[in-house]
Amino acid sequence: MIKILLKKKSRITVHDPKAMKNTEAIFKNKITYADSLLKPLDNCDCVIIMTPWKIYTKLKNNSFKNMKRKLIIDTRRILSRKNLNAEYFALGMGN
């Protein structure tokens, strides 16, 4: 996903408590790395959840309040049961 977004000239900030070192070894300074879960959400256009880590289940409406465009793509469906005030797309789910 990161490689595709970089080809599209996207600015990317990643947060992953378990894969940060590996990601940094691959992408080096091509992307930004975040220690905080919420800070990268400020002024971002889109959040893509790619891992099922429990920390991401704690996200709620208030977490997304400072986003420019509230677009959430959840590839793990971990937020699907929450009533979010955002454009929310959970992969693998029908209407």
Image: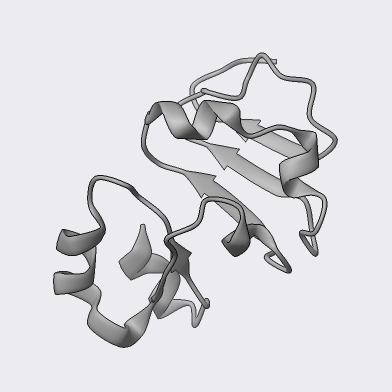
**Place of residue 75 in the rendered image (x, y in percent of width and height, measured from the top left):** 46, 34
Q: Tell me which residue sits at (74%, 47%) in the image.
A: 64
Q: Tell me which residue sits at (70%, 64%) in the image.
A: 42
In this view, 34 is above or below 9:
above
In this view, 21 is above or below 18:
below
**Which of these two is toward me, 90 or 54?**
54
In this view, 26 is above or below 90:
below
On screen, residue 80 versus residue 61, left or right, reads left
On screen, residue 82 versus residue 18, left or right, reads right
Q: Quadrant of residue 25?
A: bottom left
**Which of these two is toward me, 3 or 48?**
48
On screen, residue 29 versus residue 87, left or right, reads left
Q: Quadrant of residue 46?
A: bottom right
**Place of residue 51 in the rendered image (x, y in percent of width and height, measured from the top left):** 36, 37
Q: Quadrant of residue 62?
A: top right
**Place of residue 81 in the rendered image (x, y in percent of width and height, measured from the top left):** 66, 13
Q: Tell me which residue sits at (44%, 64%) in the image.
A: 34
Q: Tell me which residue sits at (54%, 26%) in the image.
A: 57
Q: Quadrant of the C terminus?
A: top right
**Place of residue 80 in the rendered image (x, y in percent of width and height, measured from the top left):** 63, 20
